[in-house]
Amino acid sequence: MAARARRILILGGTAEGRALASLLSAVPGVTAISSLAGRTKEPLMPEGETRSGGFGGVAGLAAYLREKAVDLVADATHPFAARISTNAATACAQTGVPYLRLERPAWEQLDGDDWHKVGDSAAAAAALDSGARVLAAVGGGELDPFLARGDIFLVARMIEPPQAPVPANCEIVLARPPFALEEELELMREKSITVLVAKNSGGAGYAKLVAARMLKVPVVMIARPPKPAAPMAATAEGMRNLILASR
Ligand code: NAP
């Protein structure tokens, strides 16, 4: 009798998650299911089986792992998606399912960078000078502390328009990443940006930091939230190898 396919749950929502799904789809005897949070109306879909929407906390995820007979969870969520990672590590510990994490390396400050490191969005908003023209490279759900600063002008880039109207001191630029260096330079020049607020996501969004360095625009850099300890890989290929070695 043929052995049952090994079932891998990929927690995705990132380019690395999609790359891992493609790599695993080429491995015989492996079935990968990619899970998306379901926030983006038209997400880029990974190859293979997918599901969408929250699991319902730790209990919901633990039930899902049992019901779907998941053999391993590969957490490829964004470095700033802390809740799902904590939930996944806990649900895996409860169900005895191995939990591995794919995490792209954080960006490092280089010569010529003027970075002001802060712990979260609220601290980033508090660090801005009155009168600043801010490019806020944060998610649409994280704008509130910046919108609360009536003494700054905010340019916020989003994939989809915000649900609620934004105040007059905020301009929404609709665009889907990744952005080339030329696009970043043009946006910062065109909007007369005096400060960039960025999350230390790592990966393909680095062009905005190069643009800031070139234009001598200071950066308020939000540090990553802590994530649970786990066997880690930094790339999709590394994670595929870790998964295959963990048999
Ligand atoms: P979060 O705060 O860590 O998670 C909040 C809740 O959303 C989780 O408790 C879970 O709901 C649900 N969820 C999150 N990721 C999920 C997934 N891959 N599959 C199923 N449910 C998921 O996450 P977030 O920061 O809002 O990010 C949401 C998604 O967007 C993630 O998949 C992440 O990879 C992606 N993303 C996030 C960022 C960012 O800056 N945060 C940037 C780019 C992409 P339940 O408790 O109901 O299970």
Image (tube, rainbow, N blue to C red):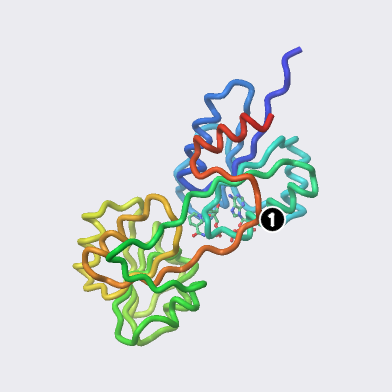
Instruction: Check mark 1 vs ligand 1: CB closer than 8 Å? yes or no.
Output: yes
Q: Is residue 158 left or right of residue 32?
A: left
Q: Looking at numbered disc 1 in the image, what kind of residue is underneath it? A: Asn
Residue 74, relative to residue 151: is it above or below?
above
In terms of secondary structure, where does tag 1 sit?
helix
Quadrant in which the N terminus is drawn:
top right
Residue 63, percent from left and from top: 77, 46
Q: Is residue 138 left or right of residue 99?
A: left
Residue 43, percent from left and from top: 46, 47
For image coordinates 38% across by 79% down, the residue present is: 167
Q: Nearer the viewer, residue 232 or 207?
A: 232
Query: Which residue is disc 1 drawn over?
Result: 87
Residue 20, relative to residue 104: is it above or below?
above
Quadrant in the picture for residue 29: top right
Quadrant assignment for ligand 1:
bottom right
Q: Nearer the viewer, residue 130 or 165?
A: 130
Quadrant in the picture for residue 221: bottom left
Q: Nearer the viewer, residue 160 or 84?
A: 84
Residue 202, percent from left and from top: 43, 54
